[in-house]
Amino acid sequence: MSVLCTPAPDDLPPPPDLTRLAAMLSRLKLTAIRDQLDTLLAEAARRELTLAETLALLCEREIARKDERRIEMALGLARFPMVRDLAGYDFGAQPAVDKQQIRELATGRFVANGEAVLILGPPGVGKTHLSVGIGRAVITAGYTVLFTPATALIAQLVKAHAEGRLEERLIHYCKPKLLIIDELGYLPVEPDAAHVLFQLVSRRYERGSILLTSNRAVSEWGSVFGDPVVATAILDRLLHHSHVLTIRGESYRLREKRRAGLLGTTGAPSATRAPSIARAARSPDAPPTPPGVS
Ligand code: ADP
Ligand code: MG
């Protein structure tokens, strides 16, 4: 019996042909395992891993590489206007922002549930920063995201409508799991534009999430859209399952300038300053007459 159990040296499996193994891993698209084969096998031997543990180690590396690639690609497709993340958001400077609520949003659960997020507040308080940070976290959580300034989105929809391609554009904007529409309200929305925007919002309703930032309180949306009926119809869908963050307080940029001694204490450029300094202190993307959030 013992002869049967103990293979003769000739019966031992041949040493693995790593070239052949690498070719098979390529064919299976297990490129992380292929590229790190030597080190992974050495690590498994050093840690005296069982076969199952070795297999788990290999799978973990492959999944980690695939996740990295997916995140990198999704970040490119999201078209964020700036590189920002939630770790870089100074919550101490903005007590109106509930860190716990942002953490919850960062899990991406609201996307899984098809809920909307509205971030409202005056210019410079970090609405775009938070929307990009949440968008990145949502990508890491496994979803697709598209960021678009409200003006560009509306212009695209109106143009497509005029060219008879609205359906195609609506499909495009319905594809990502999360659509971030930034800075609604800086420019008034024409009635035709409001109507196509309504079509988009109602098509995504309960199917895909929208994160929308605005410098205008929802009570002012009637005037933003120039049509209270369309504004109410849009809000009705956005607010049904929603998280609303209202940020009050002063612009982060102005706060920084004040700290640097460039401004007085009111937020307005100091009257005694030279005009060039006052110009430098003005927020570059602020509208001519920044309205607050009521
Ligand atoms: P908003 O969209 O509300 O006008 P932004 O998100 O564009 O404001 O913020 C303006 C600038 O200030 C950005 O560079 C942003 O990163 C920064 N900023 C705003 N608030 C904060 C904050 N609380 N912590 C760190 N940076 C901030
Ligand atoms: Mg902004």
Image: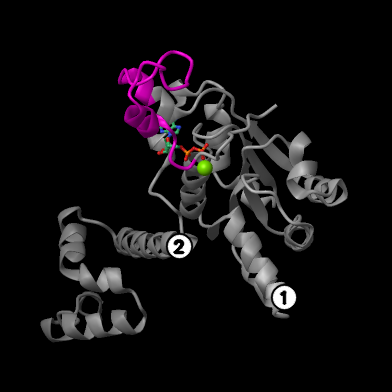
The front one of 262 and 232 is 262
Q: Considering the whole magenta stretch, tell me its main secondary structure.
A: loop
Q: Position of residue 170 (x, y in %)?
A: 69, 69
The front one of 9 and 120 is 120
Q: Position of residue 83 (x, y in %)?
A: 38, 48
Q: Is residue 166 visible?
A: no
252 sits to left or right of 100:
left
Q: Is residue 224 above or below residue 64?
A: above
Q: Position of residue 63 (x, y in %)?
A: 38, 62
Give the quarter of the figure containing the N terminus.
Answer: bottom left
Give the quarter of the figure containing the C terminus.
Answer: top right
Residue 225 counted in the magenta span = no
Q: Is residue 224 visible?
A: yes
Q: CA distance from mark 2 to mark 1?
A: 30 Å
Q: Amino acid at mark 1?
A: Ala
Q: Is residue 190 above or below residue 90?
A: below
Q: Position of residue 292 (x, y in %)?
A: 63, 29
Tell me the quarter of the picture where residue 29 sits.
Answer: bottom left
Number of the label disc, if any, that sits on residue 74 = 2
- Magenta extent: 256-285
Tell me the quarter of the picture where residue 262 sits.
Answer: top left
Mark 1, residue position? 162
Q: How is the image coloured?
A: one colour
**Crowd band around label 1 with a 10 angstrom C-alpha radius: few (<14), some (14–19), many (20+):** few
Taking the spot 48% from the left edge, 28% from the top edge, the residue there is 251
Q: Is residue 61 above or below residue 220?
A: below
**Quick one: which residue is furthest to the left in this view?**
9
**Crowd band around label 2 with a 10 angstrom C-alpha radius: few (<14), some (14–19), many (20+):** some
